[in-house]
C-alpha cells in the first residue's frame, strides 16, 4: 500500500513539475533544444514509471513496528535539530547536545551518553578545526566571550 | 612500453611522502569502516569525501585517499563476516557462509589470513587488469561524439537499473529522481532558473556532497536504529594465525580464477562486488565436485568470494576512469569527487590528467601491499574495533557528516537539505528502492543533458542523430538488452523451476 501511495505522490510531483518546466523559456537561444526539454522528458518518464508502481504488482513494505518507528521519527527530529543548531550554537555545544539523545536512543546509559557527548564535541572539534584545518562554527556565544 | 613509462610516473606521484601517508591513513580508515557492520565502502567514501575536499587536498591526493578507503573497506568486510557472522559490507555476504563455520572450528586465524591473501590476489589481478585494458578502452572511446556519449550514459543507467533490485519501475524511479534533482539550479546554457522556487541557495543546484551525505550517512543512521539488535560476541582469536601450505595449495587456483572472473564482472557497469562474489562462490562450489566442505567451513569458501569481491571492486574503476561512466554507487560517488575538482572524467582523462590517472593506479598497488601487511600481522588491532559500541559510533558518524556538509558552503540550508534527503533515502530504502541508480542519475544528469543538447545542436534538432552511428545503435541495443534481459532470464528461470516441480 505504501508503495502505491508513494507512486501517487510521484505522479503528482511529475504533473506539477511538468507544469513548472513548461515555463522554462530562454530569453534568446541559439540551440534547438532549450532548457525545458530534458527536465520534461525526465518528469514524463518519472510519471509513467510511478503509474506503473501505482497499478503494478507491489510487495508489502516492511515498515518498522510502531514503537521503533516513533524512535526513528524522534532520531530524525534530533538530527534535523542538529542541522538547525549547528551554526548557531557552534560545533562543540550542538554536538554534545545532540549526542546525548542519540546515544540514549542507541542504548547507552545516561553516564555513557553524557561522556560521549562531551568527548565527541571537544575531541572532534580539536581534530577537525585545529589538526585538519577544517573550519567549524564556534557559535555566537563563544564569539561574545572571546570578542 | 609507453604504459610502463606512464606507470612509473604514477609511482612517482603516489610515492611522495604525503601521498604514502594519505594512502596509509586511507587503508586503515577503510578497513575500520569496512568491518563495522552497517557501514560499507559507499558510506566510507561518502563520509570522507567532503572531509578530503575541506582539507583542500590536491585532486590526486584526494582520489588516492578515497581509493585507499575503498580498497580498505573490501578487506574490512571479511573480518566481521568471519568473526561475527555479520557481513561488514554487501560484498562479504558470501564470506560468512564458510568464514563463520571456520571460526567456530577454531580456525578464525587461518580464515582471516587466507581471506586477506585472497583479497590481495583479487585486487592485484584487477589492478593489473586496469593497467592492461583501461588505456585501450579510453583510446577506443575517444572517437565518441556527444550522441554516442548520451547513449553510453543511457546504457550505464540501464545496466544498473536492470541488475540492481528486483523491480524495474523502482530502479527507474530511483534513477529518474536522481536525474530530476540534477536539473535544479541555473541552466548553464541559457541562464534560466530551474526548480529553484526563488530560493537563492538553490541557484547553484543541490551540492553533490549534500545528496551523498543525505543518502548514505543520514539514511544509514536511521536504518541502523531500525535494525538495532545486540551484536553477537565476536569469536576470540586463538591458535595459529597463518594458514598452512596445504590450505594454500587447496585454494590457490580458486583465488586466481575468482580474481580474473571478478575483474571482468566488475568492469561491467551495474554488476558489482555482490554479484561477483556470489557467482564465484557458486561456481567454485560446483567445480569442487564431491570432495569439499563448502558451507561447513572450507578454505576455498572464503578465498573465492574475497578474491572476487576485491577484484570486482577494482575492476569497477575501469568504466569510471576510461568512459567517465561509473558502474556502481561507490564509483559514482568517486566520480562526483572528480567533478568537485572541475575534472571531467571521460576518455580524455588519460591524456589530460595522466598524473591523476596513473597516480591513482600506482596508489592502488601500494595501498594493496599496505593492506596485506596491515591485515595479517595487525589483525588483532582491527578486531578491537568490532567492540566499538553503536551508541558512540552513530553520533560520531552524524557529527562527521555534518562537518563535511558544512565545509562546502558553511550554511544551515545545506545541512537541512541533507537531513531531508536522508529521510527520503530512508523511505526509499525501506520500500526496497535501489539507491545506486539514484546517485548515478544525479552524477550523470548534467553531462547527459549537455551531451543530448550538443548532439541535437550539431544535427540542428534532428533526433535521428542519436541513432545514426553504428556505435550508437550498438549501445542502444545493449541498453535495452541490459534493462530487460536479466528480468526475462529470471522469469524464464522461475518458469522452468515451476515446470520441473
Image: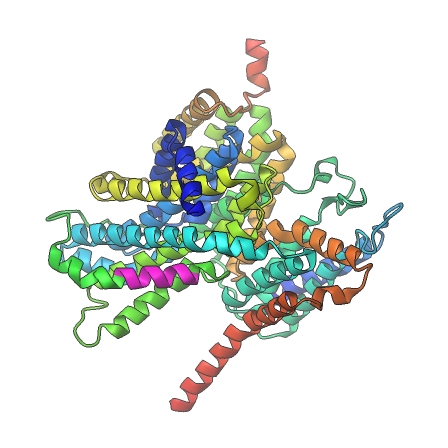
x then y, percent, for residue B389: 33, 40
- At x 68%, y 69%, the residue is A51
x then y, percent, for residue B167: 54, 69
Please, is residue B131 above or below residue A92 in the view? Answer: below
Q: Find the residue positioned furthest to the top.
A: A147
x then y, percent, for residue A77: 55, 42
> In the displayed structure, does residue B282 sit left or right of residue B176?
left
- At x 61%, y 69%, the residue is B474
> In the displayed structure, does residue A25 sit left or right of residue B491?
right
Give the magenta part as a residue range: B255-265
> In the displayed structure, does residue A142 sit left or right of residue B448?
left
Residue B256 falls within the magenta-colored stretch: yes
Residue B316 falls within the magenta-colored stretch: no
Observer-nearest of B443 and A146: B443
> In the displayed structure, does residue B127 sit left or right of residue A64?
left
Observer-nearest of B497 and B1: B1
Observer-nearest of B163 and A135: B163
For residue B435, say whether it is visible: no
For residue B324, say whether it is visible: yes
Amino acid at each position: 500500500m505504501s508503495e502505491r501511495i508513494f507512486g501517487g505522490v510521484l505522479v503528482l510531483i511529475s504533473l506539477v513539475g511538468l507544469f513548472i518546466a513548461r515555463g522554462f523559456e530562454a530569453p534568446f537561444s541559439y540551440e534547438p533544444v532549450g532548457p525545458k526539454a530534458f527536465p520534461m522528458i525526465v518528469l514524463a518518464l518519472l510519471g509513467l514509471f510511478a503509474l506503473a508502481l501505482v497499478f503494478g504488482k507491489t510487495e508489502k513494505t516492511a515498515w518498522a513496528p510502531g514503537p521503533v518507528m516513533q524512535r526513528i521519527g524522534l532520531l530524525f527530529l534530533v538530527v534535523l535539530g542538529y542541522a538547525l543548531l549547528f551554526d548557531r550554537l557552534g560545533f562543540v555545544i550542538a554536538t554534545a547536545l545532540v549526542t546525548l539523545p542519540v546515544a540514549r536512543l542507541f542504548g547507552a546509559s545516561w553516564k555513557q551518553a553524557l561522556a560521549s557527548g562531551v568527548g565527541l564535541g571537544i575531541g572532534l572539534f580539536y581534530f577537525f578545526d585545529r589538526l585538519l584545518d577544517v573550519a567549524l562554527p564556534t557559535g555566537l556565544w563563544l564569539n561574545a566571550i572571546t570578542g | 612500453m609507453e604504459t610502463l613509462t606512464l606507470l612509473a610516473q604514477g609511482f612517482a606521484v603516489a610515492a611522495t611522502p604525503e601521498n604514502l601517508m594519505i594512502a596509509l591513513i586511507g587503508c586503515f580508515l577503510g578497513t575500520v569502516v569496512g568491518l563495522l557492520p552497517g557501514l560499507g565502502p559507499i558510506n566510507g567514501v561518502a563520509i570522507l569525501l567532503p572531509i578530503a575536499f575541506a582539507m583542500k587536498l590536491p585532486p590526486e591526493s584526494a582520489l588516492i585517499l578515497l581509493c585507499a578507503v575503498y580498497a580498505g573497506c573490501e578487506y574490512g568486510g571479511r573480518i566481521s563476516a568471519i568473526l561475527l557472522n555479520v557481513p561488514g559490507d554487501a560484498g562479504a555476504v558470501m564470506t560468512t557462509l564458510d568464514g563463520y563455520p571456520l571460526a567456530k572450528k577454531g580456525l578464525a586465524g587461518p580464515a582471516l589470513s587466507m581471506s586477506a591473501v585472497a583479497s590481495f590476489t583479487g585486487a592485484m589481478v584487477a589492478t593489473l587488469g586496469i593497467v592492461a585494458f583501461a588505456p585501450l578502452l579510453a583510446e577506443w572511446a575517444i572517437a565518441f561524439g556527444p550522441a554516442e556519449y548520451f547513449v553510453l550514459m543511457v546504457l550505464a543507467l540501464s545496466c544498473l537499473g536492470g541488475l540492481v533490485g528486483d523491480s524495474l519501475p523502482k530502479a527507474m524511479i530511483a534513477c529518474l529522481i536522481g536525474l530530476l534533482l540534477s536539473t535544479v539550479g541555473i541552466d548553464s546554457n541559457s541562464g534560466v532558473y530551474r526548480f529553484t522556487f526563488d530560493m537563492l541557495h538553490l541557484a547553484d543546484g543541490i551540492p553533490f556532497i549534500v545528496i551523498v551525505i543525505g543518502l548514505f550517512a543520514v539514511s544509514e543512521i536511521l536504518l541502523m536504529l531500525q535494525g538495532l539488535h545486540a551484536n553477537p560476541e565476536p569469536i576470540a582469536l586463538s591458535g595459529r594465525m597463518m594458514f598452512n601450505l596445504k590450505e594454500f595449495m587447496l585454494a590457490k587456483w580458486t583465488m586466481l580464477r575468482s580474481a580474473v572472473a571478478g575483474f571482468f564482472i566488475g568492469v561491467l557497469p551495474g554488476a558489482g562486488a555482490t554479484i561477483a562474489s556470489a557467482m564465484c562462490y557458486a561456481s567454485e562450489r560446483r567445480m569442487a565436485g564431491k570432495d569439499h566442505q563448502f558451507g561447513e567451513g572450507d578454505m576455498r569458501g572464503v578465498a573465492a568470494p574475497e578474491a572476487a569481491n576485491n577484484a570486482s571492486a577494482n575492476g569497477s574503476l575501469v568504466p569510471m576512469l576510461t568512459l567517465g561512466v561509473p558502474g556502481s554507487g561507490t564509483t559514482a560517488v568517486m566520480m562526483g569527487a572528480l567533478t568537485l575538482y572541475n575534472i571531467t572524467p571521460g576518455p580524455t582523462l588519460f591524456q589530460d590528467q595522466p598524473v591523476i590517472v596513473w597516480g591513482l593506479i600506482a596508489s592502488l598497488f601500494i595501498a594493496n601491499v599496505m593492506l596485506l601487511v596491515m591485515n595479517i600481522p595487525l589483525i588483532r588491532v582491527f578486531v578491537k574495533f568490532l567492540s566499538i559500541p553503536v551508541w558512540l559510533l552513530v553520533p560520531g558518524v552524524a557529527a562527521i557528516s555534518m562537518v563535511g556538509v558544512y565545509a562546502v558552503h558553511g550554511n544551515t540550508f545545506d545541512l537541512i537539505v541533507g537531513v531531508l534527503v536522508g529521510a527520503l533515502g530512508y523511505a526509499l530504502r525501506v520500500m526496497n528502492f535501489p539507491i545506486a541508480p539514484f546517485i548515478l542519475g544525479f552524477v550523470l544528469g548534467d553531462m547527459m543533458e549537455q551531451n543530448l543538447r550538443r548532439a541535437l545542436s550539431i544535427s540542428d534538432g534532428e533526433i535521428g542523430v542519436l541513432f545514426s552511428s553504428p556505435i550508437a545503435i550498438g549501445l542502444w541495443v545493449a541498453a535495452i538488452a541490459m534493462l530487460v534481459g536479466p528480468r526475462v532470464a529470471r522469469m524464464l528461470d522461475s518458469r522452468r523451476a515451476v515446470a520441473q516441480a
